[in-house]
Image (cartoon, rainbow, N blue to C red):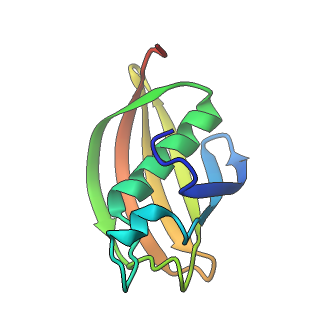
């Protein structure tokens, strides 16, 4: 895992045949926030995308490669000292060479954090 100790998956479950929901707690003491940013920590967008990928890999029990990313919208800054629990709702649509997803990430109160679409393909494990 690229982000050791950066987050903890509190819950990961299948909502229906094509939707999973993952609740994730960001570690506000993680060293990444020393540089991003020391007095006002902000969860990096690329870290949220990595969490999304990791949750999918856990659910699919496969190593994955994000082949395409589109319609990415970071809608709210995530300061882990204020709110550090995120809910990822991921709709999965199988394709011939992998699958497409639509992601909606929010705080517990429903406020939007991240929206994106992506295409993933299976990546052989080393």
81 above or below 73? below
Q: Residue at x 67, y 40 (%)?
A: 17
93 above or below 70? above
Examine the image and state in which quarter residue 98 appears: top left
* Residue 55 placement (x, y as % from top left): 57, 44
Q: Which is more toward the observer, 100 or 58?
A: 58
* Residue 10 placement (x, y as % from top left): 72, 58
45 above or below 54? below
28 left or right, relative to 33: right
Q: How many marks?
A: 0
Q: Which is more toward the observer, 64 or 31?
A: 31
10 left or right, relative to 73: right
Q: Residue at x 44, y 76 (%)?
A: 78
108 left or right, relative to 118: right
* Residue 18 placement (x, y as % from top left): 60, 42
76 left or right, relative to 1: left
Q: Residue at x 41, y 69 (%)?
A: 33
Examine the image and state in which quarter residue 83 appears: bottom right
Q: Residue at x 49, y 16 (%)?
A: 125
* Residue 124 placement (x, y as % from top left): 45, 14
9 above or below 122? below
């Amino acid at each position: 895992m690229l982000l050791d100790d950066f987050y903890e998956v509190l819950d990961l479950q299948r909502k229906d045949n094509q939707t999973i929901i993952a609740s994730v707690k960001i570690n506000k003491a993680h060293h990444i926030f020393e540089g991003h940013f020391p007095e006002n920590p902000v969860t990096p967008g690329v870290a949220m995308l990595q969490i999304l990928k990791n949750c999918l890999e856990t659910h699919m029990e496969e190593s994955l490669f994000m082949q395409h990313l589109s319609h990415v919208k970071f809608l709210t800054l995530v300061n882990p000292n204020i709110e550090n629990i995120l809910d990822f709702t991921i709709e999965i649509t199988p394709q011939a060479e992998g699958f497409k997803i639509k992601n909606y990430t929010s705080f517990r109160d429903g406020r939007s954090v991240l929206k994106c679409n992506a295409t993933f393909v299976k990546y052989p494990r080393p």
